Amino acid sequence: MSPADELERARFEAIGRAVEKAGFASPVVVGASPASLGPLSALLATHDGKGVLVVASTPHGSESVAPVEVETGSTPAELGVRGVRFERFLDGADLVDVVVEHTPFQLESSHQFDRHHVVRTRGGALTLACDLDDDDTSSYAKGPRSVTSRRTVTVSRVPGAAPLQFDVKTVSATEERTAEAPPVVTDRTESSTRYELPPSGTCRALPR
């Protein structure tokens, strides 16, 4: 990710140095939050011989940081991170949704998928509150036939619930195409899971 101006360049350099001091090697900023969500950044790095994606807050002066690991792989490249965006999670005052877009390398097929990593920001400390699958699309072709599988995910807050509760609805479908024929949906499923996220701790699926 390239900095937009000199101020952002200084921010990226500061968070990179702080993450290195925290024990992570070769950190590279791949996403930054808007000012309304605080000075958060996502960085690819290596740690303990593996590739990691971490979220960290820009330090003040020489203070230390405690990056939160949200994804791991054999190498940073294996994670296939295409982009990272930061959003408020369901209007939670201290909850930030780190949405990671992936395009892993594949020889004979294509695959794109997203993941939600909900981070709690409280008192200058970051903690991981929830991990959720998001949209996913994969496809391959063999001769005149192509197959595309899609997963669409919708997250919605349960009104009036305390502590915070939300529903995750998933619709999955497989579509096949052949030359000069309309697409045919060969499989389609729907599911919904309700989660609870207490003011501290991590989210949990509720029994139906």
Image (spheres, rainbow, N blue to C red):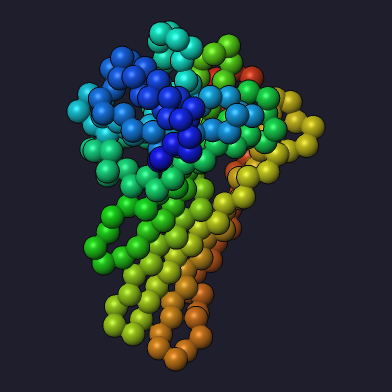
Q: Specify whether residue 208 is in view.
A: no
Quadrant the C terminus occupies: top right
Which residue lies at the image location 40% right of the left edge and 85% below the top edge? 178
Outermost residue on the left side: it is 49
User: Closest to the observer: 5 or 136?
Assistant: 5
Number of marks present in the image shown = 0
- The part of the image, by quadrant, that contains residue 152 is bottom right
Q: Residue 19 appears at what percent x and percent y?
A: 35, 20
Instruction: Examine the image and state in which quarter residue 193 appears.
Output: top right
In the image, residue 156 above or below residue 9? below
On the picture, is 95 further left or further right than 9?
right
Instruction: Say whether residue 99 is left or right of residue 30.
Output: right
In-image side of 105 versus 165 (left or right): left
Q: In this view, does 200 lie above or below 116?
A: above
Residue at the location (60% across, 29% down)?
A: 35
Closest to the observer: 42 or 5? 5
Hey, which residue is sitting farthest bottom in the picture? 180
Task: Give the residue displayed 40% in from the left and 62% down from the top.
Answer: 138
- Percent x, y of residue 10: 43, 25
- Up the image or down, 174 lies above or below 176; here it is above
Residue 115 percent across, percent down from the top left: 47, 43
In this picture, residue 195 sits left or right of residue 100: right
Identify the residue shown where x is 70% and y is 33%. Answer: 91
Answer yes or no: is residue 155 visible: yes
Q: Position of residue 205 (x, y in %)?
A: 57, 35
